[in-house]
Image (cartoon, helix red, strand yellow):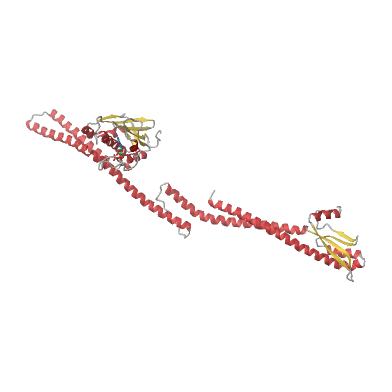
Amino acid sequence: MKLHYKIALGVTFIQTLFLLFSTVFNAERFKTSIREEFASKTDSRAQLLALKISRFIEKNDIQAAITVAKKYQTGSPITYVKVVKGKNTLLDIHTTQFVPSASESEDFSEYLKKTQNESKILDAYAEIINSSGQTIAELQIGMSFYELDETISIYYRRQILFLFFQVMLMNSFVWLLSYLITRRLTRLEKACEQVGSGNLSIAFKADTSHDEIGSLSRTFQKMTLELQTALLERDSQKEKTLSASKMSSLGEMAGGIAHEINNPLTIIIGKIELIGIKVKNGSITPEQLAVELSKIHATCQRIDRIIRGLRNFSRDGEQDPFVESNIKQIFDDTLELCRARFNNLGIDLKISVDPMITAECRTVQISQIILNLLNNSIHAVENLDKKWITLEASVKENSIMIEVTDSGSGIPKHIAEKLSQPFFTTKEIGKGTGLGLSISRGIAEQHGGSLKLDTECKNTSFKLLIPKKRNMKIAA
Ligand code: ADP
């Protein structure tokens, strides 16, 4: 339920209770005061009637007294008039006009008792005094409360109607007020949602009013702008870090790569010199020349592959599209950059990959992970007696698993626990940045996959899992 509905309902409920209570209280007070007023009026009426009929009672002209009493009774809520002298009732008239439930056939005295018990008739008494000032009889009159009660119930109904309109009016006002407040909050909430979901480029116009919501809105706008700047800074920092890590990997490979290029170049130069001499001597046949040239061509192609691999690797692959790539090709391109190092250090490299397996990925990034894992393995085994590294790829349900295992005997628990921390390194200064694994893990996650140390393996093994297709989920 929306907030302004809740506020309006809450206020209406409290207000209704309050108004109901005050209405009932006021009505009760009204009822008491009107009854009191009525009682005092009844007494005056009794005295007035007693005065009017006194001379007829004195003369014992009961008929004339009845006529006066009836006239007096007409149009007023006087239910009965009685004149009592000692034990004798001189006059007794009554009407049911103001007592709706009474019937003429009913014994009036019975009826009177009942209604008096129910406080529906108010009795008043007055002395009838003769011309010489002596009390000669007593006048009793009964006034019906029915009419009065009718007035009170009309008052009640009006009060309730008034209460209803009051509540409705107040409710509409509260609803409107809370709607105006929550509408501004809702705008802010929507902007928060957008920012929360990473959309910082929303066109949010801050509230200009000088109240709390306006101030909150301006603070939010300021915060969003600062967040935008911070994120831009973070992205540029991330790029720098990524590039630093790449450069570090390349740095480690540099010696090997120079050797890798230098060797074929020496071969090419030697061969060209030899061919030159043989051509001068005429000691080379065209067929032999063709064979030598094709050897030079193949060696040049190798250098070309290494240089392309280097150029490719140093490129930022983060913006590359995900393309269906052959895993063996990725292995070959990556190994092109470090094969010489394996040879130089005498590390036995075993590769196991089905040439048909493919994955939808960013090749440069996957290559970066593999190169980083291989670099770490080379570093770990270069001084061991048994130096071997295996690079394997296999299909695991809807994912591709790439494993780099070396002859090391695993990573101690206290170091393994810190592997996910950026800048954690056990390598000496200048050799390690401590970024390789965290960046590699980030790339694996961007691919919807994972990179984990295999703690079950008795050697040191890292497993990279990436989905075969971009939208597939990797098996847990
Ligand atoms: P760096 O290689 O720059 O130190 P990494 O994040 O790639 O950064 O590696 C962090 C640490 O993980 C290494 O310093 C090393 O202690 C440990 N490590 C990674 N791979 C291996 C491995 N194959 N064998 C032993 N330790 C490893």
Query: For ligand 1, which image quadrant applies?
Result: top left
Instruction: Please determine whether, in this image, residue 71 is positioned above or below residue 196.
Output: below
Give coordinates of residue 170: x percent, y percent: 59, 57
At 76% from the left and 59% from the top, the residue drawn is: 148
Toward the right, the furthest residue is 60
The quadrant of the picture occupied by the C terminus is top left
Residue 168 visible here: yes
Note whether residue 333 is visible.
Answer: no
Q: Nearer the viewer, residue 288 or 261?
A: 261
Left/right placement of residue 390 relative to residue 107 reads left
**On screen, residue 388 above or below 200:** above
Q: Position of residue 8 (x, y in %)?
A: 57, 53
Q: Position of residue 228 (x, y in %)?
A: 37, 51
Residue closest to the eye, 453 or 304: 453
Left or right side of 8 for 89: right
State the image quarter where residue 38 is shown.
Answer: bottom right
- Give the image location of residue 233, x and y in percent: 34, 50
Query: Is residue 461 shown above or below 38?
Result: above
Among the 4 quarters of the image, the one containing residue 416: top left
